[in-house]
Image (spheres, rainbow, N blue to C red):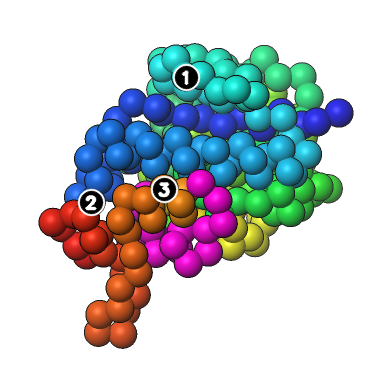
Amino acid sequence: MAIDAVIPFKPKNPKTRLSCVMEQEERETFARAMLADVIAASCEGGCSPRLLCTAPYLHPTAEVCVDADGLNESLNRVLSAASSPLLIIMGDLPLADGAAIRRLVSTEADMGIVPGRGGGTNAIFLRHPGRFRADYYGASFLKHMAIADEAGLSVEVIDSFRLHTDVDEKEDLVEVLIHGRGEARRCLQSLGFVLSVEGGRVGVERRTHKETL
Ligand SMILES: Nc1nc2c(ncn2[C@@H]2O[C@H](COP(=O)(O)OP(=O)(O)OP(=O)(O)O)[C@@H](O)[C@H]2O)c(=O)[nH]1
Ligand SMILES: C[C@H](OP(=O)(O)O)C(=O)O
């Protein structure tokens, strides 16, 4: 049976750390494009996507649950109610692919975890969701490792470039333009983002926008 992949998603005013290069409506479009890539990867990886949204959101195939509460509160409700293995995967991983997800959910450990850039947590696979609780924000990778340890769960830290790359800041857009293969990359291109090299460092610039980086 397919493993449920819970994907937290904030459709309204998301990705505020990209405000320096995108207006709110553009951030909403880009967040939806990244989500589409994560949903496609989850399906390819043999999982069944379930969106956990802060506001009503329509999707043609994925199941949608609306919970306006904070990320940890809503996820912890899902974890306590779950009776079978569960994947939590963030909606801002546009490089995710089926092979990486399959690798994560194939772990023999009680928990498989993929750290995010800068201390966060991008994906957690739990064989026994009721024994774990989520504590996102800040150095959540370290907090999640400590929670697993306290609960006596065996853990495998999965080394995956495609699942490790979350998109929070303008610099992260470089990775999407170089390595993206889906909606998020197309969305950035349609918004006018292109790679630029200045002083030997690769960045992005926006052809249709006043601000560049
Ligand atoms: N269900 C739910 N999802 C959330 C919430 N906050 C963020 N998310 C989602 O969780 C994932 C990771 O969140 P962040 O990287 O903090 O994204 P964000 O809040 O849109 O970005 P910033 O405004 O830049 O912090 C993304 O898929 C978000 O859409 C929340 O309160 N509830
Ligand atoms: C939700 C948060 O995301 P970040 O802000 O680190 O991308 C985390 O992974 O704890």
Q: Give the range drawn in magenta.
A: 168-183
Residue 98 visible in the displayed image: yes
The image quarter containing residue 137 is: top left
Q: Which of marks 2 and 3 is in front?
A: 3
Q: Earlier in the sequence, mark 3 or mark 1?
A: 1
Q: Where is residue 201 in the image (x, y as percent from the top left)?
A: 32, 79
Work out which quarter of the rendered image holds the N terminus and state it. Answer: top right
Instruction: Give the mark count.
Output: 3
Q: Specify the principal SS of the magenta part.
A: helix
C-alpha span from label 2 to label 3 = 14 Å
Q: Is residue 166 left or right of residue 197?
A: right
Residue drawn at x 65%, y 30% is 49
What residue did someone put label 1 on? 57
Q: In this view, does 37 lie above or below 197?
A: above
Residue 141 visible in the displayed image: no
Q: Position of residue 44 (x, y in %)?
A: 73, 43
Number of the label disc, if any, that sits on residue 187 = 3
Q: Where is residue 136 in the image (x, y as percent from the top left)?
A: 46, 37
Q: Please, what secondary structure does the residue beneath circle 2 have?
A: loop
Residue drawn at x 19%, y 62% is 212
